[in-house]
Amino acid sequence: MTSTGRTTVENSGGRTRGSSSAGFCSGGGNWSGINIAIMVVSFVFFWPVGLLVLYWILKGRDARDLPAAIREKVQGATGLWGNKHSYSGNAVFNEFQQTQYDRIREIKDEIKERSNRFKDFRSDAKRRADEEEFNRFMSSSPSSES
């Protein structure tokens, strides 16, 4: 909808937000230091790529995700360019291959989960050790009575 130079945009959450041409950059974007650096380098390298990165950042995405998103779109459109899952023409082999890929993905997910649990365990252990050290300090230091 357009009314008096102001547009209303509905985002995926169902909420609407208004944006005017004067405040285009003020309302959003993922303006982290790395994103700004990538944008500047891409403008220096080749300005159309810089515009693409600028658009990507304004959409609120991380610039480091852009190459993977482009690769995904190209693979989806053409089925070429680094296609990990090759089509052999044999349906049974393709099913077998897909089950192997799924199994590998499950193993990777399990490894990530274990890694996260171990990080949590380590942080809890450190917290308990710090608390124990603090309690020893408090019990050994003379308390000052006022």
Image (tube, rainbow, N blue to C red):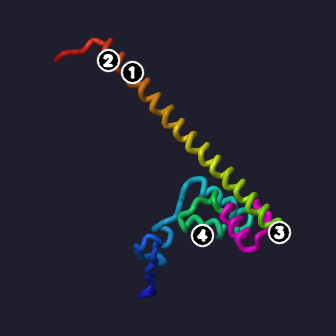
- Residue 89's tag is 3
Mark sitting earlier along the chain (2/1): 1
Q: Name above or below for residue 73 compared with residue 6.
A: above
What amino acid does circle 2 point to? Met
Q: Mark 1 highlights which residue? A: 132
Q: Position of residue 143 (x, y in %)?
A: 25, 15
Mark sitting earlier along the chain (3/1): 3
Q: Residues within 10 Å of mark 4 (few under 14, many from 20)?
A: some
Determine contact: label 2, label 1, CB under 8 Å.
Answer: no
Q: Position of residue 1 (x, y in %)?
A: 45, 86
Q: Is residue 57 visible?
A: yes
Query: Is 69 covered by the magenta stretch?
Result: yes
Determine contact: label 2, label 3, CB under 8 Å.
Answer: no
**Residue at 45% across, 81% down:** 7
Determine contact: label 2, label 4, CB under 8 Å.
Answer: no
Regarding mark 3 in the picture, which secondary structure is present there? loop
**Total numbered labels placed on residues in the image:** 4
**Left or right placement of residue 13 versus residue 109 in this view:** left
What amino acid does circle 1 point to? Glu
**Left or right placement of residue 75 versus residue 66 in this view:** right
Query: Marks 4/3: CA distance?
Result: 40 Å
Residue 55 figure quarter:
bottom right
Mark sitting earlier along the chain (4/3): 4
Q: Mark 2 highlights which residue? A: 138
